[in-house]
Amino acid sequence: MRKTVLAVLLAVIVLAPAPAWGQETLRLPGDTTDEQLAEAVKGLTKLEDLSLTDTKVTDAGLVLLKGLTNLTGLGLG
């Protein structure tokens, strides 16, 4: 589990473009699950843009986003 979370976070660092000044952006890799999403967004209270495109996140996982009050962009392709 710990290795999986670290792999997801490493992929985010490598794949995510540099955010605009003051903006927090998170792009998760395609093999991200609901559980990994929960770990990835934990504590990201300033997150504004989240890409879940082509991930394995389900409708149940989207419930985890309700606490992200600054979220203004969400990619679900």
Image: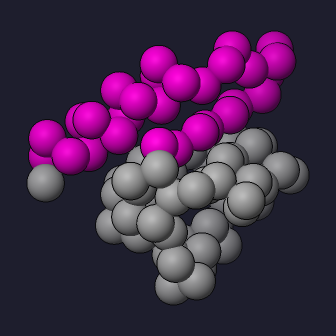
Query: Does the magenta portion include 58?
Result: no
Q: Is residue 35 visible?
A: yes
Compared with 52, 66 (above or below) is below
Q: Residue furthest bottom?
A: 60
**The C terminus, quarter of image:** bottom right
- Is 70 positioned to the left or the right of 61 in the image? right
Locate residue 58, reporting x and y percent: 52, 78
In the figure, residue 19 lies in which quadrant? top right
> What colour scheme does the image use?
one colour
Query: Does the magenta portion include 14?
Result: yes
Locate residue 3, reporting x and y percent: 14, 41
Name the residue rendered at 61%, 38% in the picture.
Answer: 26
Name the residue rendered at 68%, 47% in the picture.
Answer: 50
Front residue of 68 and 73: 73
Locate residue 4, reporting x and y percent: 21, 46
**The N terminus, quarter of image:** bottom left
In this picture, which residue range is highlighted in magenta? 2-29
Name the residue rendered at 27%, 35% in the picture.
Answer: 7
Locate residue 70, reporting x and y percent: 79, 51
- Give the total of numbered labels: 0
Q: Residue furthest right?
A: 72
Name the residue rendered at 68%, 34% in the picture.
Answer: 25
Q: Is residue 38 visible?
A: no
Front residue of 24 and 14: 14
Compared with 27, 52 (above or below) is below
- Is 66 positioned to the left or the right of 37 in the image? right
- Is 39 positioned to the left or the right of 76 in the image? left
Compared with 45, 57 (above or below) is below
- Is 41 positioned to the left or the right of 25 in the image? left
